[in-house]
Amino acid sequence: MLTSILAAFVLLVTFTTLAGGQGEKGLAKSFPWQFRLAAKLRTPVLVFIVVPLSFIMWLRMQAKRTLKLLRHPSKESVAAQHAQAVALLVAQLEAWNKAGRKGKLRTARPNWAAMSTKLASNKEGCHLVSISHLNNILEVDVEKMTLKAEPSVTFGECTDVLLPLGLALQTHVEMESITLGGCALGFGIETNSHRVGLFQESAVEYEIVDSYGVMRTVNKTNDPELFYALPWSYGTLGFCTAITLKLVPTKPFVRLQYEPTSSPEELERRLTEYTKMTNPPEFLEATAFTPTQAVIQAGWYSDGPSSEPDKTMKVNPINHFYKPFFFRHVERFVGTEGGAELIPLKHFLHRFSRSIFWEIEDMIPFSNHPLYRCLWGWLGAPEVSLLKLFQGPVIRKASVYAHVVQESIMPLRELPAGLRLFDRIYGVYPLLVFPVRVWNRGALSGFVTPPEHLLETDERGERTAMYVDVGAYGVPREVKQGRSWDAKASIREMEEWTHKVNGWDAPYTDIACTLREFRALFNHELLDKTRARLGALECFPEVYDKVKPEAGIIDLSDEMAAEAKARAAGTVNGAANGAANGAANGA
């Protein structure tokens, strides 16, 4: 019996390899043969090599986590170990200073291990500093409701430590392998961001080491400029060695309410109504499945069926390997009257880990089939770092023009227009829709600063604006239909529109803007001022230099030449003219 099942499974894989997935069948002949061959063989390579290797990596990681939990080191020994880890970093920087401060400072972490779309690192000629040893949770303070951890700690590790205590991070990103440091100095958003904002709003204190090897403990009281400049700085101010984050009390379950909508305008109206509630849901997001149909998911903490008005409410452990992917489960509510259920908190927090949001179906087309889930699903999803490691430069370049990973943070009022633009230039579904509250702190506003006309003042006197993050991940419609898709033009059009409506793009995705356009898209004023004060201008690259398009992937030479010509003619005034003008000049 087992032999027959395995034989049927191998036949299924073979058939899929020969038939090709949706994206592979649509690839134009202009794509390099290496990419078309890799696309043809992608499914069996993932199923029989990458997925088992990912499972082995997961076992190793779980063993390390378990050992850490079993050791129960004292507070003193944890502090001593942290001091030793910081001393190793300081020693590297002191050696660099003594050698004449040659090369700009970057971490030694390989780019394939980072949570970004880029394979190349832009680290050529830089001095690489190792920080991978900074990977311990240092303290959970139940009285202060804070967690102090080193930057390489992952959200999965935080889940293992905090949930048994009835606690969670104020902003808990759903992907288990993402690190706290990456979100703290980069970009982080979650399904409760409509209440608490971006991940940076959960930071209480940072510990960083500057280029001179001097350790600084930074909070909003002792150095507010540095404190608010650190988010989105991408390590251009110093090396983070620890971060203290806010915690919140939790309950064992989330009562999730599913509400379908039938138009972009209805979706925007209902999300706005949810965010303006006196006591809004703890969790709020939506998933768009077509240009008109979406499902809102609103969640509240719950003690279980006995605490609900409906004592028979179903408990759905969505992350068991034999269960359908969460996004497919949500899709069942399209065109219905909606519904509600209870989800165990840990399952909810990591609801997209098994399916890498919804990317896995583009990689393994039958991955949601019951046969695959039962025979192979227990191995988990492919590890993102391994997916990048198995790419070569040719495949990476071609994938940019055959695959979308884009996020745009736009004012909530612009959501209908944004969804229509996403549909026209990407044609990728589902779409991720996360409402997010963004603060304006005047001179202390960092990279993302909402304009005055979008601001509202809350009961605490704080000025915020409601935005929404829309994410597209998958194969563009035109590629599926066998037509060429101009990634550069599409991404630049989205960047220009996002800037026009006072929004921002996520720098971890593929970007197609020049340095001038990037500096117009994001508010660099506080970061530039703080970098100059810390002497970081000569020691660390600009943010753009860390996230810019890889050489040979997206060519911006025409746009930069047009900018140079405009400057020579006196029609461009630095970054202030904005990304829209830059895009027009480069068209």
Image (cartoon, helix red, strand yellow):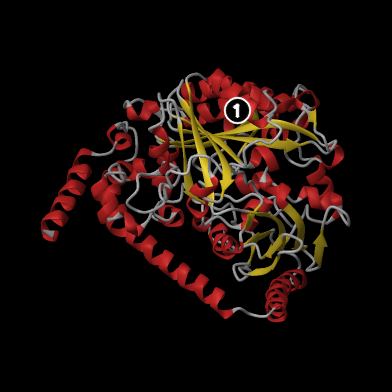
Front residue of this view, candidates 533 and 431: 431
Residue 587 visible, this angle: no
- Tell whether 54 sits left or right of 110: left
Q: Secondary structure at mark 1?
A: helix
**Quadrant position of the N terminus in the picture:** bottom left
Residue 518 horizontal/vertical position (percent): 67, 36
- Tell whether 87 sits left or right of 272: right
> What residue does disc 1 label?
271
Give the residue at x 37% y 62%: 55
Front residue of this view, candidates 230 and 125: 230
- Tell whether 219 sits left or right of 99: right
Residue 483 horizontal/vertical position (percent): 35, 25
Front residue of this view, candidates 497 and 64: 64
Residue 565 visible, this angle: yes
Residue 278 horizontal/vertical position (percent): 71, 33
- Tell whether 440 sits left or right of 260: right
Front residue of this view, candidates 503 and 294: 294
Give the residue at x 62% y 38%: 281
Residue 557 horizontal/vertical position (percent): 58, 34
**Quadrant position of the C terminus in the picture:** top right
